[in-house]
Amino acid sequence: MGLELEYIKGQTPIEEEEKEELKIKTISTRGELDEFEQVNIEKAIEWSLKSNPSYEKILTVAFIKEVHKRMFSEVWGWAGRFRKTNKNIGVDKFQIEVELTKLMDDCQFWIGNKTLSEDEIAIRFKHRLVKIHPFPNGNGRHSRLCADILISKGLNKNIFTWGSKNITDQGDTRTKYLNTIYEADKENIKPLLEFARK
């Protein structure tokens, strides 16, 4: 019996070849997968709380990969590696590193020149990161943790609340969150900024 997954709105389907890199072969349902991933993610959050990187270190391709690897390496073989297929969202697979480098450069500029508030820098960083969609899966959770690391460790402000509820499960909070992402896609960042501090 293989891994059979049902997807909720806003989730990126996992390709069959990506499913083959599942490390825990007994996982067969979305609930089991979510449970194992959450345990791994909590370890990554714990690591992020203990680490103290500068914003210069956070804003590197290597750090972005490291965060994803720490979040998913106990569950997926491809954790921390860029996707090799195109998805229903994200840049072309061959443009991932180029677009990430542009994003890092932009953030360095915004911070260095104080052109945006700290919150807006971190939220624009999160939004572009998820829009690039560098990894086979987990991009939303990864981009939120990266934004929390940037705002707390790099910019010395409180982490975001992200609507103060679980946004990985289907429900009103997730719907509101996705709507703020769609607005940000249309260059209206304000709803996502507000949601992040709700």
Image (cartoon, grey):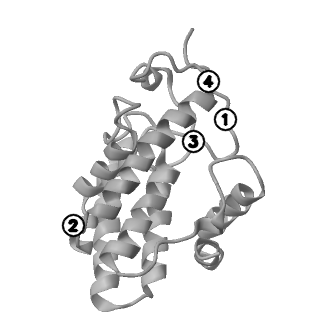
Instruction: Determine crowd level at label 1: few under 14, some 14-19, many 20+ residues with C-alpha closer than 10 A.
Output: few
Query: Which residue lies at the image location 35% right of the left edge and 91% below the top edge?
Result: 114
Of the numbered discs in the image, which one, if any, rests on residue 165?
A: none
Residue under pointer 1: 7
Secondary structure under the numbered disc 4 in the rendered image: loop
Q: Which tag is nearer the camera, tag 1 or tag 3?
A: 1
Separation of residues labelled 3 and 2 (CA atoms): 30 Å
Q: Is residue 69 left or right of residue 140?
A: left
Of the numbered discs in the image, which one, if any, rests on residue 57?
A: 2
Rendering coords of residue 152 (x, y %): 38, 74
- Hey, what amino acid is under mark 3? Asn
Secondary structure under the numbered disc 3 in the rendered image: loop
Q: Earlier in the sequence, mark 3 or mark 2?
A: 2
Of the numbered discs in the image, which one, if any, rests on residue 88?
A: 3
Which residue is at the far top?
Answer: 1
Give the quarter of the image for residue 175.
Answer: bottom right
Instruction: Determine crowd level at label 3: few under 14, some 14-19, many 20+ residues with C-alpha closer than 10 A.
Output: few
Secondary structure under the numbered disc 2 in the rendered image: helix
- Hey, what amino acid is under mark 2? Lys
In the picture, the quarter occupied by the N terminus is top right
Q: Is residue 177 above or below residue 76?
A: below
Residue under pointer 4: 29
Q: Is residue 103 left or right of residue 144?
A: left
